[in-house]
Image (cartoon, helix red, strand yellow):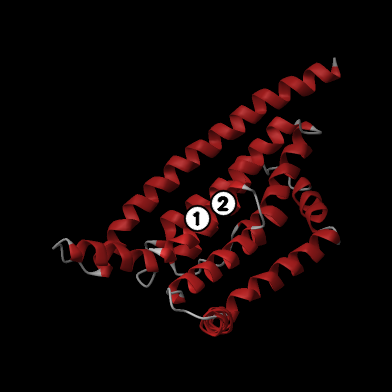
Amino acid sequence: MLVLLGIGVVVLGFVLRANPLLVVMAAALTTGLAAAWTPTADLQTMYAAGVATLSAFGKAFNDNRYVSVVWVVLMAIGLLERAGLQERARAAIAKVRAATVGRLLWVYLIIRQGAAAVGLTSLGGHPQMVRPLVAPMAEGAATAKYGELPDRERFLIRSHAAAVDNIGLFFGEDIFIAIASILLIQGFLEQNGILVEPLELSLWAIPTAITALLIHTLRLWLLDRRLQRALAAKSGGAAS
């Protein structure tokens, strides 16, 4: 039961709002030392347990070092934003007269869901697409039509940009047969005595994806109507 002390360390660390990385490290070391402790354990035994725990951390990091590649991507995006990527995106979309927030997000929804359906789930995402490109372009489309945006409408546009990415990925990826979610569903059904092939699950995901696309298309159309009412009224009031 002593190994459960690690859970207590996690709870205490989050209650004190300590650094999450330090909390997880402390919890792992506590669990490792507690697992090795016995009433007859000496200092050398505990030292060996601590070294073994740190070695396990090092091995896990080395085996999964590809996970650290994401930090390189984030740094590249940060440099692009510092160089004016968002401003360029806003300026580019402002030149397209037919562009509206709903139409722009609808095009991204089609691209995101179609790419996910063929297994390209990394083609998109909040840090690499929504924040630096999609959301600024949507704001630029609204600014070109209605002028400077109030914070309420600006945050509304950003939330819809994030939602489009989530919906496109969530309902598109299940169409691709070699995806973890399909295998998870198959394994769960098989455990409960229901035998089904991954291809059947993928095929049945198509009507759901189409329905989600149609429903969110309507939501984006309603978003355009809502922005038009709110921002046109404000811009008209400011002009008068």
The answer to which of 92 and 65 lies nearer the viewer is: 65
Look at mark 1 in the image and give the residue it sits on.
8
Q: Residue at x 78, y 48 (%)?
A: 95
Disc 2 marks a residue whose amino acid type is Leu
Q: Secondary structure at mark 2?
A: helix
Classify residue 206 as left or right of residue 232: left
Disc 1 marks a residue whose amino acid type is Gly
Q: Quadrant of residue 159?
A: top right
Mark 1 crowdedness (10 Å alpha carbons): few <14, some 14-19, many ≥20 = few
Q: Residue at x 83, y 19 (%)?
A: 238
Q: Quadrant of residue 84?
A: bottom right
Tell me the quarter of the image containing the C terminus. top right
Looking at the rendered structure, the number of numbered marks drawn on it comes to 2
- Give percent across and percent down for residue 235: 78, 23
- Disc 1 + disc 2, Cβ < 8 Å: yes
Q: Secondary structure at mark 1?
A: helix
Residue 12, which numbered label? 2
